[in-house]
Protein backbone atom coordinates (compact mmCIF):
# COMPACT_ATOMS: atom_id res chain seq x y z
CA UNK A 1 0.00 0.00 0.00
CA UNK A 2 3.04 2.27 0.30
CA UNK A 3 2.14 3.71 3.67
CA UNK A 4 4.58 6.48 4.59
CA UNK A 5 5.34 8.24 7.86
CA UNK A 6 2.56 10.81 7.34
CA UNK A 7 -0.01 8.02 6.93
CA UNK A 8 1.18 6.34 10.11
CA UNK A 9 0.96 9.63 12.00
CA UNK A 10 -2.62 10.19 10.79
CA UNK A 11 -3.53 6.60 11.67
CA UNK A 12 -1.87 6.90 15.09
CA UNK A 13 -3.79 10.10 15.85
CA UNK A 14 -7.02 8.26 15.08
CA UNK A 15 -6.19 5.39 17.47
CA UNK A 16 -5.14 7.66 20.34
CA UNK A 17 -8.08 9.99 19.75
CA UNK A 18 -10.79 7.33 19.64
CA UNK A 19 -9.57 5.51 22.77
CA UNK A 20 -9.18 8.80 24.67
CA UNK A 21 -12.67 9.94 23.66
CA UNK A 22 -14.20 6.60 24.67
CA UNK A 23 -12.60 6.70 28.11
CA UNK A 24 -13.49 10.37 28.61
CA UNK A 25 -17.20 10.20 27.78
CA UNK A 26 -17.70 7.08 29.92
CA UNK A 27 -15.75 8.20 32.97
CA UNK A 28 -17.41 7.89 36.37
CA UNK A 29 -19.13 11.12 37.39
CA UNK A 30 -18.11 12.50 40.76
CA UNK A 31 -20.00 10.69 43.53
CA UNK A 32 -21.60 8.21 41.12
CA UNK A 33 -20.46 4.69 40.40
CA UNK A 34 -21.52 2.94 37.16
CA UNK A 35 -24.60 0.77 37.47
CA UNK A 36 -26.05 -1.71 34.98
CA UNK A 37 -28.19 0.97 33.29
CA UNK A 38 -25.11 3.18 32.79
CA UNK A 39 -23.03 0.32 31.40
CA UNK A 40 -25.57 -1.45 29.20
CA UNK A 41 -27.91 1.42 28.23
CA UNK A 42 -25.63 4.47 28.63
CA UNK A 43 -27.82 5.71 31.47
CA UNK A 44 -30.55 6.44 28.89
CA UNK A 45 -28.72 9.61 27.87
CA UNK A 46 -28.21 9.10 24.13
CA UNK A 47 -29.31 11.91 21.80
CA UNK A 48 -30.74 11.44 18.29
CA UNK A 49 -27.48 12.20 16.50
CA UNK A 50 -25.51 9.77 18.69
CA UNK A 51 -28.16 7.06 18.12
CA UNK A 52 -28.25 7.56 14.34
CA UNK A 53 -24.46 7.60 14.04
CA UNK A 54 -24.09 4.56 16.27
CA UNK A 55 -26.68 2.55 14.31
CA UNK A 56 -24.71 3.06 11.09
CA UNK A 57 -21.32 2.52 12.72
CA UNK A 58 -22.49 -0.77 14.26
CA UNK A 59 -23.91 -1.86 10.92
CA UNK A 60 -21.14 -0.92 8.47
CA UNK A 61 -17.88 -2.82 8.79
CA UNK A 62 -14.93 -3.35 6.47
CA UNK A 63 -16.49 -6.39 4.84
CA UNK A 64 -19.49 -4.25 3.85
CA UNK A 65 -17.30 -1.48 2.43
CA UNK A 66 -15.01 -3.82 0.51
CA UNK A 67 -17.76 -6.35 -0.25
CA UNK A 68 -20.21 -3.75 -1.58
CA UNK A 69 -17.51 -2.19 -3.75
CA UNK A 70 -16.79 -5.67 -5.10
CA UNK A 71 -20.50 -6.15 -5.76
CA UNK A 72 -20.52 -2.77 -7.49
CA UNK A 73 -17.80 -4.17 -9.77
CA UNK A 74 -19.79 -7.39 -10.34
CA UNK A 75 -23.45 -6.30 -10.54
CA UNK A 76 -23.46 -2.53 -10.19
CA UNK A 77 -25.87 -0.31 -8.31
CA UNK A 78 -28.35 -3.16 -7.69
CA UNK A 79 -26.42 -4.07 -4.54
CA UNK A 80 -27.50 -0.69 -3.11
CA UNK A 81 -30.93 -2.23 -2.45
CA UNK A 82 -29.51 -3.65 0.79
CA UNK A 83 -28.88 -0.10 2.01
CA UNK A 84 -31.84 1.73 0.48
CA UNK A 85 -34.36 -0.88 1.57
CA UNK A 86 -32.82 -0.64 5.05
CA UNK A 87 -33.77 3.05 5.15
CA UNK A 88 -37.47 2.15 4.86
CA UNK A 89 -37.04 -0.70 7.35
CA UNK A 90 -35.54 1.68 9.92
CA UNK A 91 -38.61 3.91 9.69
CA UNK A 92 -40.92 0.89 10.19
CA UNK A 93 -38.91 -0.17 13.25
CA UNK A 94 -39.02 3.38 14.62
CA UNK A 95 -42.78 3.73 14.25
CA UNK A 96 -44.09 0.24 15.05
CA UNK A 97 -41.47 -1.69 17.06
CA UNK A 98 -39.66 0.88 19.21
CA UNK A 99 -42.73 2.24 21.04
CA UNK A 100 -43.46 -1.24 22.42
CA UNK A 101 -39.82 -1.99 23.31
CA UNK A 102 -39.32 1.30 25.14
CA UNK A 103 -42.69 1.10 26.91
CA UNK A 104 -41.63 -2.29 28.34
CA UNK A 105 -38.29 -0.79 29.51
CA UNK A 106 -36.33 -3.79 28.23
CA UNK A 107 -32.53 -4.18 28.16
CA UNK A 108 -32.47 -6.99 25.60
CA UNK A 109 -34.55 -8.64 22.86
CA UNK A 110 -34.64 -11.94 24.87
CA UNK A 111 -36.21 -9.89 27.68
CA UNK A 112 -38.95 -8.82 25.24
CA UNK A 113 -39.51 -12.53 24.40
CA UNK A 114 -39.94 -13.23 28.13
CA UNK A 115 -42.49 -10.40 28.48
CA UNK A 116 -44.57 -11.78 25.61
CA UNK A 117 -44.06 -15.54 25.91
CA UNK A 118 -42.10 -17.22 28.72
CA UNK A 119 -38.71 -17.55 30.39
CA UNK A 120 -37.90 -20.85 28.66
CA UNK A 121 -38.12 -19.38 25.15
CA UNK A 122 -36.21 -16.30 26.33
CA UNK A 123 -33.37 -18.43 27.67
CA UNK A 124 -33.18 -20.58 24.53
CA UNK A 125 -32.93 -17.50 22.32
CA UNK A 126 -30.51 -15.74 24.69
CA UNK A 127 -28.09 -18.69 24.52
CA UNK A 128 -28.55 -18.85 20.74
CA UNK A 129 -27.77 -15.14 20.32
CA UNK A 130 -24.67 -15.34 22.53
CA UNK A 131 -23.30 -18.18 20.40
CA UNK A 132 -24.26 -16.32 17.21
CA UNK A 133 -22.50 -13.13 18.34
CA UNK A 134 -19.34 -14.87 19.56
CA UNK A 135 -18.84 -17.63 16.97
CA UNK A 136 -20.38 -15.95 13.92
CA UNK A 137 -20.57 -12.16 14.14
CA UNK A 138 -17.45 -11.35 16.19
CA UNK A 139 -15.25 -13.87 14.42
CA UNK A 140 -16.45 -12.80 10.97
CA UNK A 141 -15.97 -9.07 11.54
CA UNK A 142 -12.57 -9.68 13.13
CA UNK A 143 -11.35 -12.02 10.39
CA UNK A 144 -12.69 -10.12 7.37
CA UNK A 145 -11.70 -6.79 8.90
CA UNK A 146 -8.15 -8.01 9.47
CA UNK A 147 -8.12 -9.45 5.94
CA UNK A 148 -9.11 -6.03 4.59
CA UNK A 149 -6.32 -4.32 6.53
CA UNK A 150 -3.87 -7.00 5.40
CA UNK A 151 -4.82 -6.11 1.82
CA UNK A 152 -4.56 -2.33 2.16
CA UNK A 153 -1.71 -2.02 4.70
CA UNK A 154 0.25 -5.21 4.09
CA UNK A 155 1.00 -7.30 1.02
CA UNK A 156 -2.28 -9.20 1.04
CA UNK A 157 -0.43 -12.49 1.63
CA UNK A 158 -1.83 -13.10 5.12
CA UNK A 159 1.33 -12.31 7.10
CA UNK A 160 -0.37 -9.27 8.66
CA UNK A 161 -3.63 -11.14 9.34
CA UNK A 162 -3.28 -12.34 12.95
CA UNK A 163 -1.47 -9.22 14.21
CA UNK A 164 -4.28 -7.15 12.63
CA UNK A 165 -6.92 -9.27 14.41
CA UNK A 166 -5.17 -8.77 17.75
CA UNK A 167 -4.81 -5.04 17.10
CA UNK A 168 -8.49 -4.63 16.20
CA UNK A 169 -9.62 -6.61 19.23
CA UNK A 170 -7.40 -4.67 21.63
CA UNK A 171 -8.51 -1.34 20.14
CA UNK A 172 -12.21 -2.20 20.49
CA UNK A 173 -11.68 -3.52 24.02
CA UNK A 174 -9.57 -0.52 25.11
CA UNK A 175 -12.61 1.70 25.57
CA UNK A 176 -15.71 -0.53 25.25
CA UNK A 177 -14.88 -2.91 28.11
CA UNK A 178 -14.45 -0.03 30.53
CA UNK A 179 -17.06 2.40 29.26
CA UNK A 180 -19.86 0.13 28.03
CA UNK A 181 -22.50 1.40 25.62
CA UNK A 182 -21.81 5.04 26.44
CA UNK A 183 -18.23 4.76 25.17
CA UNK A 184 -19.37 2.77 22.12
CA UNK A 185 -22.17 5.14 21.09
CA UNK A 186 -20.38 8.46 21.56
CA UNK A 187 -17.20 7.31 19.80
CA UNK A 188 -19.41 6.06 16.95
CA UNK A 189 -20.18 9.69 16.10
CA UNK A 190 -16.51 10.17 15.17
CA UNK A 191 -16.34 6.73 13.55
CA UNK A 192 -19.23 7.57 11.19
CA UNK A 193 -17.71 10.94 10.27
CA UNK A 194 -14.48 9.12 9.39
CA UNK A 195 -16.35 6.39 7.52
CA UNK A 196 -18.22 8.90 5.35
CA UNK A 197 -15.13 11.09 4.88
CA UNK A 198 -13.02 8.11 3.79
CA UNK A 199 -15.71 7.02 1.35
CA UNK A 200 -16.07 10.50 -0.13
CA UNK A 201 -12.29 10.84 -0.58
CA UNK A 202 -12.04 7.50 -2.36
CA UNK A 203 -15.08 8.20 -4.59
CA UNK A 204 -13.93 11.67 -5.61
CA UNK A 205 -10.40 10.52 -6.43
CA UNK A 206 -11.67 7.45 -8.32
CA UNK A 207 -14.03 9.56 -10.46
CA UNK A 208 -11.30 12.10 -11.11
CA UNK A 209 -8.96 9.39 -12.46
CA UNK A 210 -11.44 7.40 -14.57
CA UNK A 211 -11.18 9.76 -17.60
CA UNK A 212 -8.14 11.45 -19.17
CA UNK A 213 -9.82 14.86 -18.79
CA UNK A 214 -10.37 14.42 -15.04
CA UNK A 215 -13.14 15.98 -13.00
CA UNK A 216 -15.93 14.44 -10.90
CA UNK A 217 -18.77 15.34 -13.29
CA UNK A 218 -16.78 14.02 -16.28
CA UNK A 219 -16.09 10.84 -14.34
CA UNK A 220 -19.75 10.27 -13.47
CA UNK A 221 -20.80 10.92 -17.06
CA UNK A 222 -18.10 8.56 -18.35
CA UNK A 223 -18.95 5.58 -16.13
CA UNK A 224 -22.68 6.03 -16.81
CA UNK A 225 -22.14 6.11 -20.58
CA UNK A 226 -19.56 3.31 -20.53
CA UNK A 227 -21.26 0.94 -18.07
CA UNK A 228 -24.94 1.87 -18.24
CA UNK A 229 -26.00 -1.69 -17.44
CA UNK A 230 -24.38 -1.29 -14.01
CA UNK A 231 -26.92 1.41 -13.07
CA UNK A 232 -30.04 -0.79 -12.92
CA UNK A 233 -31.53 -1.51 -9.49
CA UNK A 234 -33.69 -4.43 -10.69
CA UNK A 235 -31.74 -7.26 -12.32
CA UNK A 236 -33.14 -9.35 -15.16
CA UNK A 237 -33.25 -13.17 -15.00
CA UNK A 238 -30.33 -13.53 -17.40
CA UNK A 239 -28.05 -11.55 -15.09
CA UNK A 240 -25.38 -13.80 -13.45
CA UNK A 241 -26.16 -12.15 -10.08
CA UNK A 242 -29.93 -12.78 -10.28
CA UNK A 243 -29.88 -15.52 -7.60
CA UNK A 244 -28.35 -13.07 -5.13
CA UNK A 245 -30.65 -10.18 -6.09
CA UNK A 246 -33.75 -11.81 -7.65
CA UNK A 247 -35.27 -8.97 -9.66
CA UNK A 248 -38.48 -7.37 -8.40
CA UNK A 249 -38.50 -9.80 -5.46
CA UNK A 250 -35.84 -7.56 -3.94
CA UNK A 251 -38.55 -4.94 -3.42
CA UNK A 252 -41.42 -7.21 -2.37
CA UNK A 253 -39.74 -10.40 -1.13
CA UNK A 254 -37.14 -11.79 1.20
CA UNK A 255 -35.04 -8.66 1.63
CA UNK A 256 -37.78 -7.38 3.93
CA UNK A 257 -37.26 -10.45 6.13
CA UNK A 258 -33.50 -9.93 6.37
CA UNK A 259 -33.88 -6.22 7.07
CA UNK A 260 -36.73 -6.43 9.61
CA UNK A 261 -34.87 -9.11 11.57
CA UNK A 262 -31.57 -7.23 11.47
CA UNK A 263 -32.84 -3.74 12.35
CA UNK A 264 -35.70 -4.74 14.63
CA UNK A 265 -34.57 -7.81 16.58
CA UNK A 266 -30.77 -7.78 16.46
CA UNK A 267 -29.48 -6.86 19.93
CA UNK A 268 -26.30 -5.06 18.91
CA UNK A 269 -28.32 -2.85 16.57
CA UNK A 270 -31.47 -2.11 18.56
CA UNK A 271 -29.63 -1.63 21.88
CA UNK A 272 -28.62 1.98 21.16
CA UNK A 273 -32.25 2.97 20.54
CA UNK A 274 -33.23 1.46 23.90
CA UNK A 275 -30.63 3.78 25.47
CA UNK A 276 -32.28 6.97 24.18
CA UNK A 277 -33.38 9.83 26.41
CA UNK A 278 -36.93 9.27 25.21
CA UNK A 279 -38.98 7.51 22.56
CA UNK A 280 -39.10 10.66 20.41
CA UNK A 281 -35.30 11.01 20.63
CA UNK A 282 -34.90 7.36 19.58
CA UNK A 283 -37.24 7.88 16.62
CA UNK A 284 -35.30 10.97 15.49
CA UNK A 285 -32.12 8.89 15.68
CA UNK A 286 -33.74 6.18 13.55
CA UNK A 287 -34.73 8.82 10.96
CA UNK A 288 -31.17 10.21 10.93
CA UNK A 289 -29.79 6.71 10.33
CA UNK A 290 -32.26 6.29 7.44
CA UNK A 291 -30.86 9.46 5.81
CA UNK A 292 -27.31 8.16 6.22
CA UNK A 293 -28.39 4.89 4.58
CA UNK A 294 -29.34 6.85 1.45
CA UNK A 295 -25.78 8.10 0.90
CA UNK A 296 -23.76 5.03 1.92
CA UNK A 297 -24.11 3.23 -1.48
CA UNK A 298 -23.06 6.35 -3.38
CA UNK A 299 -19.70 6.43 -1.58
CA UNK A 300 -19.13 2.66 -1.53
CA UNK A 301 -20.71 1.17 -4.67
CA UNK A 302 -19.62 3.88 -7.14
CA UNK A 303 -15.88 3.17 -6.58
CA UNK A 304 -16.57 -0.46 -7.52
CA UNK A 305 -18.22 0.62 -10.78
CA UNK A 306 -15.24 2.91 -11.48
CA UNK A 307 -12.89 -0.05 -10.99
CA UNK A 308 -15.02 -2.11 -13.42
CA UNK A 309 -14.84 0.64 -16.06
CA UNK A 310 -11.06 0.84 -15.70
CA UNK A 311 -10.78 -2.93 -15.88
CA UNK A 312 -12.99 -3.09 -18.98
CA UNK A 313 -11.06 -0.54 -21.04
CA UNK A 314 -9.70 -2.02 -24.30
CA UNK A 315 -6.02 -2.92 -24.52
CA UNK A 316 -3.89 0.12 -25.20
CA UNK A 317 -6.46 2.63 -23.91
CA UNK A 318 -6.09 2.01 -20.17
CA UNK A 319 -5.20 5.08 -18.10
CA UNK A 320 -2.92 3.05 -15.88
CA UNK A 321 -0.94 -0.14 -16.39
CA UNK A 322 -1.59 -3.38 -14.54
CA UNK A 323 -5.37 -3.00 -14.10
CA UNK A 324 -6.30 -6.43 -15.43
CA UNK A 325 -3.49 -8.17 -13.57
CA UNK A 326 -4.72 -6.62 -10.31
CA UNK A 327 -8.13 -8.31 -10.53
CA UNK A 328 -7.39 -11.68 -12.15
CA UNK A 329 -6.55 -14.50 -9.72
CA UNK A 330 -4.01 -17.21 -10.45
CA UNK A 331 -6.86 -19.55 -11.48
CA UNK A 332 -8.11 -17.04 -14.06
CA UNK A 333 -11.23 -15.93 -12.14
CA UNK A 334 -11.94 -12.35 -11.10
CA UNK A 335 -11.35 -11.08 -7.57
CA UNK A 336 -14.17 -8.52 -7.26
CA UNK A 337 -13.31 -7.63 -3.67
CA UNK A 338 -9.98 -6.20 -4.83
CA UNK A 339 -11.80 -3.11 -6.20
CA UNK A 340 -11.74 -0.86 -3.12
CA UNK A 341 -8.25 -1.75 -1.83
CA UNK A 342 -6.83 -1.40 -5.35
CA UNK A 343 -8.33 2.07 -5.84
CA UNK A 344 -7.03 3.22 -2.46
CA UNK A 345 -3.57 1.74 -3.02
CA UNK A 346 -3.23 3.04 -6.57
CA UNK A 347 -4.80 6.50 -6.54
CA UNK A 348 -5.20 7.88 -2.99
CA UNK A 349 -2.14 10.04 -2.14
CA UNK A 350 -0.11 9.67 1.04
CA UNK A 351 -1.62 11.41 4.03
CA UNK A 352 -5.11 10.84 2.69
CA UNK A 353 -4.36 7.10 2.70
CA UNK A 354 -4.02 7.33 6.46
CA UNK A 355 -7.51 8.86 6.67
CA UNK A 356 -9.05 6.21 4.39
CA UNK A 357 -7.46 3.34 6.34
CA UNK A 358 -8.54 5.01 9.60
CA UNK A 359 -12.08 5.03 8.14
CA UNK A 360 -11.85 1.29 7.38
CA UNK A 361 -10.54 0.62 10.87
CA UNK A 362 -13.29 2.77 12.39
CA UNK A 363 -15.90 0.67 10.57
CA UNK A 364 -14.40 -2.54 11.96
CA UNK A 365 -13.77 -1.35 15.51
CA UNK A 366 -17.21 0.22 15.98
CA UNK A 367 -18.89 -3.06 14.94
CA UNK A 368 -16.64 -5.12 17.23
CA UNK A 369 -17.27 -2.80 20.18
CA UNK A 370 -21.04 -2.97 19.62
CA UNK A 371 -21.03 -6.76 19.45
CA UNK A 372 -18.90 -7.09 22.58
CA UNK A 373 -21.22 -4.83 24.56
CA UNK A 374 -24.37 -6.60 23.36
CA UNK A 375 -22.93 -10.05 24.11
CA UNK A 376 -22.12 -8.84 27.62
CA UNK A 377 -25.62 -7.35 28.00
CA UNK A 378 -27.46 -10.54 27.03
CA UNK A 379 -25.27 -12.82 29.17
CA UNK A 380 -25.39 -10.55 32.23
CA UNK A 381 -29.07 -9.58 32.16
CA UNK A 382 -30.62 -12.76 30.68
CA UNK A 383 -28.34 -15.54 32.01
CA UNK A 384 -26.19 -14.38 34.93
CA UNK A 385 -28.69 -12.25 36.85
CA UNK A 386 -31.75 -14.59 36.71
CA UNK A 387 -29.90 -17.93 36.98
CA UNK A 388 -26.47 -17.46 38.59
CA UNK A 389 -26.74 -14.52 40.99
CA UNK A 390 -30.29 -13.24 41.47
CA UNK A 391 -29.23 -10.82 44.21
CA UNK A 392 -26.23 -9.43 42.36
CA UNK A 393 -25.21 -5.86 43.15
CA UNK A 394 -25.08 -3.23 40.42
CA UNK A 395 -21.29 -3.11 40.68
CA UNK A 396 -21.10 -6.88 40.23
CA UNK A 397 -23.34 -6.73 37.15
CA UNK A 398 -21.00 -4.20 35.52
CA UNK A 399 -17.95 -6.33 36.41
CA UNK A 400 -19.66 -9.42 34.98
CA UNK A 401 -20.39 -7.52 31.78
CA UNK A 402 -16.73 -6.53 31.41
CA UNK A 403 -15.49 -10.08 32.06
CA UNK A 404 -18.04 -11.50 29.59
CA UNK A 405 -16.93 -9.09 26.86
CA UNK A 406 -13.26 -9.93 27.47
CA UNK A 407 -13.93 -13.70 27.34
CA UNK A 408 -16.02 -13.31 24.16
CA UNK A 409 -13.17 -11.37 22.53
CA UNK A 410 -10.56 -14.01 23.42
CA UNK A 411 -12.77 -16.83 22.10
CA UNK A 412 -13.40 -14.93 18.85
CA UNK A 413 -9.65 -14.33 18.44
CA UNK A 414 -8.96 -18.05 18.82
CA UNK A 415 -11.75 -19.13 16.44
CA UNK A 416 -11.39 -16.45 13.72
CA UNK A 417 -8.24 -17.90 12.05
CA UNK A 418 -10.17 -21.10 11.22
CA UNK A 419 -12.39 -19.08 8.86
CA UNK A 420 -9.50 -19.13 6.36
CA UNK A 421 -10.66 -22.60 5.29
CA UNK A 422 -14.03 -21.28 4.10
CA UNK A 423 -14.05 -20.19 0.43
CA UNK A 424 -16.66 -17.41 0.85
CA UNK A 425 -16.86 -16.40 4.49
CA UNK A 426 -19.37 -13.56 4.17
CA UNK A 427 -21.79 -15.53 1.96
CA UNK A 428 -21.54 -18.53 4.30
CA UNK A 429 -22.42 -16.37 7.29
CA UNK A 430 -25.34 -14.74 5.47
CA UNK A 431 -26.81 -18.12 4.57
CA UNK A 432 -26.27 -19.54 8.08
CA UNK A 433 -28.05 -16.56 9.66
CA UNK A 434 -30.76 -16.83 7.01
CA UNK A 435 -31.66 -20.31 8.27
CA UNK A 436 -32.81 -18.99 11.64
CA UNK A 437 -33.71 -15.32 11.18
CA UNK A 438 -37.05 -15.84 9.32
CA UNK A 439 -38.41 -18.05 12.11
CA UNK A 440 -37.31 -15.70 14.88
CA UNK A 441 -38.75 -12.71 13.01
CA UNK A 442 -42.07 -14.48 12.39
CA UNK A 443 -42.48 -15.46 16.04
CA UNK A 444 -41.40 -12.02 17.31
CA UNK A 445 -43.71 -10.07 15.00
CA UNK A 446 -46.66 -12.30 15.82
CA UNK A 447 -45.88 -11.71 19.49
CA UNK A 448 -45.90 -7.95 18.92
CA UNK A 449 -49.06 -7.62 16.88
CA UNK A 450 -51.30 -10.71 17.38
CA UNK A 451 -52.75 -11.41 20.79
CA UNK A 452 -53.86 -14.95 19.97
CA UNK A 453 -50.39 -16.40 19.39
CA UNK A 454 -49.46 -18.63 22.32
CA UNK A 455 -46.14 -19.64 23.82
CA UNK A 456 -46.63 -23.19 22.54
CA UNK A 457 -47.26 -21.90 19.02
CA UNK A 458 -44.22 -19.62 19.19
CA UNK A 459 -41.86 -22.36 20.39
CA UNK A 460 -42.98 -24.86 17.75
CA UNK A 461 -42.85 -22.21 15.05
CA UNK A 462 -39.28 -21.24 15.97
CA UNK A 463 -38.14 -24.89 16.13
CA UNK A 464 -39.80 -26.03 12.89
CA UNK A 465 -38.65 -22.97 10.94
CA UNK A 466 -35.12 -24.42 10.72
CA UNK A 467 -36.04 -27.73 8.97
CA UNK A 468 -38.40 -25.73 6.72
CA UNK A 469 -35.49 -23.46 5.74
CA UNK A 470 -33.23 -26.48 5.12
CA UNK A 471 -35.84 -28.13 2.87
CA UNK A 472 -36.20 -24.93 0.83
CA UNK A 473 -32.42 -24.95 0.30
CA UNK A 474 -32.54 -28.28 -1.60
CA UNK A 475 -30.91 -27.65 -5.01
CA UNK A 476 -33.82 -29.31 -6.81
CA UNK A 477 -36.13 -26.48 -5.69
CA UNK A 478 -33.75 -23.84 -7.14
CA UNK A 479 -34.98 -20.93 -5.05
CA UNK A 480 -32.93 -17.74 -4.71
CA UNK A 481 -31.67 -17.18 -1.18
CA UNK A 482 -34.06 -14.26 -0.52
CA UNK A 483 -37.09 -16.22 -1.72
CA UNK A 484 -36.15 -19.05 0.67
CA UNK A 485 -36.24 -16.56 3.56
CA UNK A 486 -39.64 -15.18 2.52
CA UNK A 487 -41.26 -18.62 2.22
CA UNK A 488 -39.74 -19.77 5.53
CA UNK A 489 -41.19 -16.67 7.20
CA UNK A 490 -44.68 -17.29 5.76
CA UNK A 491 -44.68 -21.02 6.62
CA UNK A 492 -43.53 -20.27 10.18
CA UNK A 493 -46.44 -17.84 10.63
CA UNK A 494 -48.87 -20.49 9.39
CA UNK A 495 -47.41 -23.15 11.75
CA UNK A 496 -47.41 -20.86 14.80
CA UNK A 497 -50.91 -19.59 14.00
CA UNK A 498 -52.43 -23.04 13.53
CA UNK A 499 -50.91 -24.43 16.74
CA UNK A 500 -52.02 -21.34 18.68
CA UNK A 501 -55.58 -21.47 17.36
CA UNK A 502 -55.86 -25.22 17.92
CA UNK A 503 -55.36 -24.71 21.64
CA UNK A 504 -57.19 -21.40 22.04
CA UNK A 505 -59.54 -20.32 19.24
CA UNK A 506 -61.51 -17.61 21.01
CA UNK A 507 -59.57 -15.94 23.82
CA UNK A 508 -56.52 -13.73 23.50
CA UNK A 509 -53.28 -14.96 25.05
CA UNK A 510 -52.97 -13.45 28.57
CA UNK A 511 -49.52 -12.09 27.71
CA UNK A 512 -50.66 -10.41 24.49
CA UNK A 513 -49.91 -6.69 24.26
CA UNK A 514 -52.76 -4.19 24.37
CA UNK A 515 -51.93 -1.88 21.48
CA UNK A 516 -53.67 1.42 20.77
CA UNK A 517 -53.30 4.01 18.02
CA UNK A 518 -51.75 6.38 20.56
CA UNK A 519 -48.73 4.07 21.05
CA UNK A 520 -47.83 4.41 17.36
CA UNK A 521 -48.35 8.16 17.04
CA UNK A 522 -45.21 10.03 15.96
CA UNK A 523 -44.26 13.69 16.05
CA UNK A 524 -43.95 16.11 13.13
CA UNK A 525 -40.15 15.78 12.87
CA UNK A 526 -40.25 12.00 12.43
CA UNK A 527 -43.16 12.21 9.99
CA UNK A 528 -41.50 14.83 7.77
CA UNK A 529 -38.23 12.88 7.79
CA UNK A 530 -40.08 9.66 6.89
CA UNK A 531 -41.95 11.22 3.98
CA UNK A 532 -38.71 12.76 2.70
CA UNK A 533 -36.85 9.45 2.81
CA UNK A 534 -39.72 7.69 1.01
CA UNK A 535 -39.86 10.34 -1.73
CA UNK A 536 -36.09 10.24 -2.27
CA UNK A 537 -36.15 6.44 -2.47
CA UNK A 538 -39.03 6.48 -4.95
CA UNK A 539 -37.07 8.90 -7.14
CA UNK A 540 -33.89 6.79 -6.90
CA UNK A 541 -35.69 3.62 -7.97
CA UNK A 542 -37.56 5.48 -10.71
CA UNK A 543 -34.32 6.88 -12.16
CA UNK A 544 -32.25 3.71 -11.82
CA UNK A 545 -34.95 1.09 -12.43
Image (tube, rainbow, N blue to C red):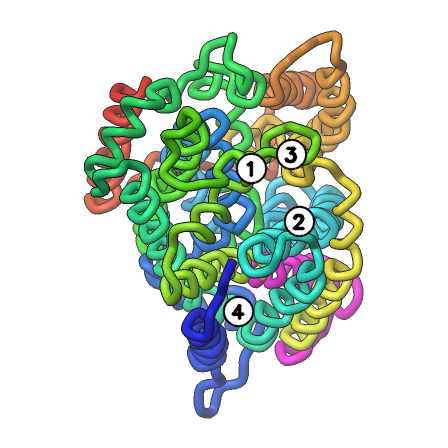
User: Which residue is rendered at x = 46% and y = 70% of the image?
Assistant: 4
What kind of element bears circle 4? helix
Image coordinates for residue 248, horizontal then vertical, percent = 44, 14
In the rendered view, would you say 240 is above or below 114? Answer: above
> What residue is shown with label 2?
140
Q: CA distance from mark 3 to mark 1?
A: 25 Å
Sequence-earlier tag: 2 or 1: 2
What secondary structure is found at the residue carrying circle 1? helix
The residue depicted at 44 percent of the width and 91 percent of the height is 30
**First in sequence: mark 3 vs mark 1:** 1
Q: Is residue 38 above or below residue 481?
A: below
Depth check, mark 3 against mark 4: the one in front is 3
Question: Which of the two discs, 4 and 2, labels the residue nearer the N terminus?
Answer: 4
The residue stretch that appears in magenta: 369-396
SS assignment at label 3:
helix
| 139 with respect to 334 (left or right) | right
Q: For the stretch drawn in magenta, what is the main secondary structure? A: helix
Q: CA distance from mark 2 to mark 3?
A: 11 Å
Q: Quadrant of the C terminus?
A: top left
Q: Which residue is mark 4?
A: 37
Q: Residues within 10 Å of mark 3 (few under 14, many from 20)?
A: few
First in residue order: circle 3 vs circle 4:
4
The residue labelled by disc 1 is 325
- In this view, the residue farthest toward the front is 316
Residue 328 locus on image (x, y percent): 59, 33
Circles 3 and 1: CB distance less than 8 Å?
no
Q: Nearer the viewer, residue 334 or 282?
A: 334
Query: Mark 3 — residue?
Result: 427
Q: Nearer the viewer, mark 1 or mark 4?
A: 1
Amino acid sequence: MNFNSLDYIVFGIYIIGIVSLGLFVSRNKKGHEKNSNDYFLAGNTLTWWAIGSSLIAANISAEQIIGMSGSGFACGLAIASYEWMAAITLLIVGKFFLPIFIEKKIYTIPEFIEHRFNTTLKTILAIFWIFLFVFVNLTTVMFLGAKALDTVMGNGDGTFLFPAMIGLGVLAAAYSLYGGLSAVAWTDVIQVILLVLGGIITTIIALDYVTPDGGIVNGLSHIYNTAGDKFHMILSKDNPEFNNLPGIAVLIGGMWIANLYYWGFNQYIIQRTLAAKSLKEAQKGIAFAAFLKLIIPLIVVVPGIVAFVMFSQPEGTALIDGVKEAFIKSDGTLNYDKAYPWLVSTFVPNGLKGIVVAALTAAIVSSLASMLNSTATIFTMDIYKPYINKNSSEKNLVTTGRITAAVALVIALLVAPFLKSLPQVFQYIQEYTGLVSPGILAVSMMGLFWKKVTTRGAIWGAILSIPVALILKIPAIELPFMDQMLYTFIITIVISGMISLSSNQYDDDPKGFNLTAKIFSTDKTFNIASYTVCIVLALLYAVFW
